[in-house]
Amino acid sequence: MSDESIPIQHDEPQGASNESLLFNLVYCSKASEGVENADVDTIIATSRRRNPVLGITGVLVFGGGVFFQWIEGPKAEVMGLVKLIEADPRHELFVILSTDEEVRERIFPTWDMELVGAENIQEVLQDAIETAQDQKSVDALQLLLDRLQTLSE
């Protein structure tokens, strides 16, 4: 099944969410057997076409057979996307690591969906911490960075 044939479903009508606050969600999943870099490239290409229309930005990390993604935007659109990801046969063992419903700034405002290699994620998170204005965003990013550093030790 191609990514183009999967419709985005919304839990609430577009525009019904509070415009001043954003929602972010971080998840991790295991790549299904046989998922290759070309599959990830397809995910990124589809995301870059869809996400601007939905008001979604974020970063996708892929490495060692694991997906790690930070998604931010209107809650209904983010949750609709998450439902698609959970149902996507390229993902297994989908786990939501964190959510925040009172986000006042985008961490990745210019990234419709950026692919970052696993070897570079700590640098990306550190840069995001340094540019974030909202303390809640800084705290969430620092927690993720700390978890990643613990895993790599």
Image (cartoon, rainbow, N blue to C red):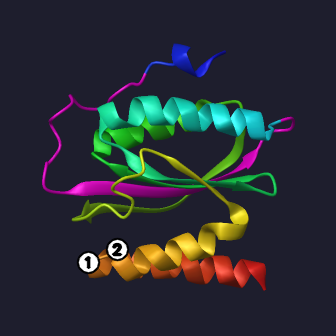
- The quadrant holding residue 33 is top right
- Residue 133 — which label? 1
Q: Residue at x 54, y 70 (%)?
A: 124
Q: Residue at x 42, y 79 (%)?
A: 129
Q: Residue at x 65, y 68 (%)?
A: 120
Which one is in front, 74 or 130? 130
Quadrant of the image containing the N terminus:
top right
Where residue 135 appears, as percent x and y from the top left, is 29, 82
- The quadrant holding residue 117 is bottom right
Task: Give the residues drawn in magenta, as a range.
Answer: 8-34
Which one is in front, 134 or 11? 134
Where residue 78 appears, as percent x and y from the top left, is 38, 43
- Residue 137 — which label? 2
Which one is in front, 133 or 18? 133
Q: Is residue 33 magenta?
A: yes
Asked if residue 126 lies left or right of residue 67, the reply is: left
Q: Amino acid at mark 1?
A: Gln
